Amino acid sequence: MSDALARLARTLTHRWRRSLVVALAALVVLGGFAANGEPATDDFKVPGSESQTAVDLLKAHTPALAGVDSQVVFTATGGKVSDPENRAAIDTALQKISKLEGVSGVVSPFDAEGLISRDGTIAQTTVQYDLPPMDAEKADGERLLDAVESAERPGLDVSARGMIVDLASEQEAPVGELVGIGIAIILLTLLFRSMAAMAATLFGALLGVILGQLLLTAVSGPLGLPAFAATIAIMLGLGAGIDYALLIIGRFREQVAAGDSVRDASAKALATSGSAVVTAGLIVMVAIAGLLVIGIPLIGKMGIGAAIGIAAVVLSAITLLPILIGAFSKRLKPKRYAHVAPSQRFARWGEIITARPWLSVGAGVLVLLVLAFPVTQLRLGQPDDGNKPADTTQRVAYDQVSKGFGPGTNGPLLITVDTPKGDAATAEQLERLRTAIAGTDGVVAATPATPSQDGEIATLTAIPSTAPQDEKTSDLVNTLRDRVIPGALEGTPLKAYVGGNTAGFQDFSDKTAAGLPIFIAVVIGLSVLLLTAAFRSLWIPLVSAVFNLLSIAASYGIVVAVFQLGVGADLLGVGSDVPIISFVPVMMFAILFGLSMDYNVFLLSRIHEAHNEGDSSRASVIHGVSRIGKVILYAGLIMGSVFLAFVTQPDVTAKMFGLGLGLGVLVDVLIVRLVIAPAVVQLLGDRAWTLPRWLDRVLPNVSLEGHLVANRDPKDPPMDGHPDALREPHETRVPAVV
């Protein structure tokens, strides 16, 4: 692999003009495909679950109930909602809502029972759409809010919640991305002490992100990728792309300082750092694509989308960066050798860590265990509008409904019953079912069953006494499914399925948790296999996997502490006791495991290089850390900053991902890579780089020995201060032809 990358780099760097034209043409062609691509969709199916069966029945027999809906809440701040002025304003708003595109129906709270609170100050209604979730758009939500707000007047407040309303509040400006890029500019400038190197690194990464987004847009329709996959791909692509680019640009500048020609320096940079980037990228892609084994389309397809984003930045790093190197080679050369020299501070740090390796490992593990402790209280679920900031319309609507009708009204259970058509006994059997459900502890009320027009299903609604997030609500769902409904329908041909958002999210969580062990085993197994093939080592991959797991557990603990326990939650604009979104832990595991292996490959490749140059075990660690420690630190700070910038998003999912991934990366870099890993390599000694003969014969040899690539051009004298500058002068470099 190293030789192939070296040849590629020489060609692209030497013929950068021609290569640039070809690259731009390829982007234009891909842009054409993307322009004709179908929009991203969200597939919320949970195959094999009871709630999914309920949804499928509704789609087949009562399509109107299978579409998205929103809740509108009217609150009289003086008097009652039935006062003439208030009622007139409400009726006018409901008329406007009923005429909106996609609205299949909206019931006036004055024409139905149970939609006005007992004290007459709060009224609610549901706006039913005939749109499936994947067809709803931001404009639908904006039109709904405009119609809703027309009812506001002195003495009457109006609020709304639901998926349509959430779409209207989506943040259009890429605040997170812009903040992350701004921080990256500052850190890259400090690292390189060169505006040109900073610009080349950032430009190369952005091109990779653009390439990834074009690819996703082009294939999202055929592959059915969810819309959130693009957000994750931007997060990952921006952070990983900058890391990969700075590693290659940094190595190029090192080689130029050593006297290599531009072509030779580019070839060695891609053969060494480029090999590490390809290996690390493959591990990230394998880890993320492993989400397919969970068995939930939404999670698996998000993994595919994220893997495409990583593949794009890897491709950009090994093709577009050599072109940029050729175009800006003069400006990329460091002004002083000190700007690319091994860090004396990190050399000293390596000496401290390796002097007492057991203490270093023990201290690092202790910190990880302390950070991971809150994970023992992890509770999977789905945050709802009760977790949104207090000033949002969704939170106001949620609180008013809870106040006027009880907390369970925010998460009703929709029971769908498969009934035999034309059976005279069905009505009596449905009433028996309703009575049993209504008499269950934890149920406030159960509505009479409503048959579908074709007579093949019936639906009834149960209102829990507790909020959707409450564990008692989950227990109620299980009680209805396991005991109440089977008992009520025993001896009848009826089959009932508990559905609705609350039950659906519970099934989603349960299915995710069930697939987690297989997923973890697949990801760890494949990652260890790739690392073993790359470094011809057995102990290094196995130990790395163990400490990666500890690092991920620490990031889980941080997320639980903030969102569930409320530590610093106010700073993020969320309340406490927010359940952890069920797919966040698996996504975090895939991403953090992959990115941890990124930094692991970067560190180990330089230590291994020093070992192959003849250094002893301890000396190779010290030299490797001195050469790559600062780069890993800055790369981690950049990656962490890019992720943390996404906590500015209003969506709690983006906040959870941003915080968990951002702090997870920082924990991994600061504790595992710069403390534990060097100490472990020191303790393993020569065993770190050995492989049983039988395994060596079986595994393919993925060479990372790019430093052995021979020069094609004569070398210039090294820069002043370079160790080789004290040796015999080099011959004058003359132009050579490829």
Image: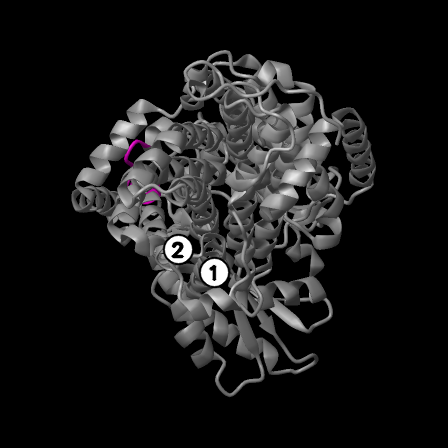
- Using residue 294 as the reference point, say whether residue 205 is left or right of it: right
Range of residues picked out in magenta: 558-568
Placement of the C terminus among the 4 image quadrants: top right
- Against 510, residue 276 (above or below) is above
Give the main secondary structure of the magenta stretch. Answer: helix
Residue closest to the eye, 98 or 599: 599
Residue closest to the eye, 619 or 632: 619
Label 1: few (<14), some or many (≥20) within 10 Å? some
Please name the residue shown 71% across and 66% down the image. 60
Residue 590 bears which disc, if any? none
- Against 36, residue 727 (above or below) is above
Residue kind at label 1, given as amino acid type: Leu
Looking at the rendering, which quadrant does residue 700 occupy?
bottom right
* Residue 396 image point, x, y percent: 45, 33
- Using residue 476 as the reference point, say whether residue 123 is left or right of it: right
Q: Are marks 1 and 2 in contact (CB under 8 Å)?
A: yes
Based on the picture, tell me whether residue 467 belongs to the magenta stretch: no
- Using residue 31 as the reference point, say whether residue 63 is left or right of it: left
* Residue 551 image point, x, y percent: 33, 46
Please name the residue shown 43% across and 64% down the image. 521
* Residue 144 image point, x, y percent: 65, 34
Looking at the image, which residue sits at the far top?
335
Gap between marks 1 and 2 measured at Cα:
8 Å
* Residue 371 image point, x, y percent: 26, 43
Based on the picture, tell me whether residue 559 belongs to the magenta stretch: yes
| Label 1 vs 2, first from the N-terminus | 1
Residue 529 bears which disc, if any? 1
Q: Secondary structure at mark 1?
A: helix
Residue kind at label 2, given as amino acid type: Pro
Residue 541 bears which disc, if any? 2
- Using residue 309 as the reference point, say whether residue 547 is left or right of it: left
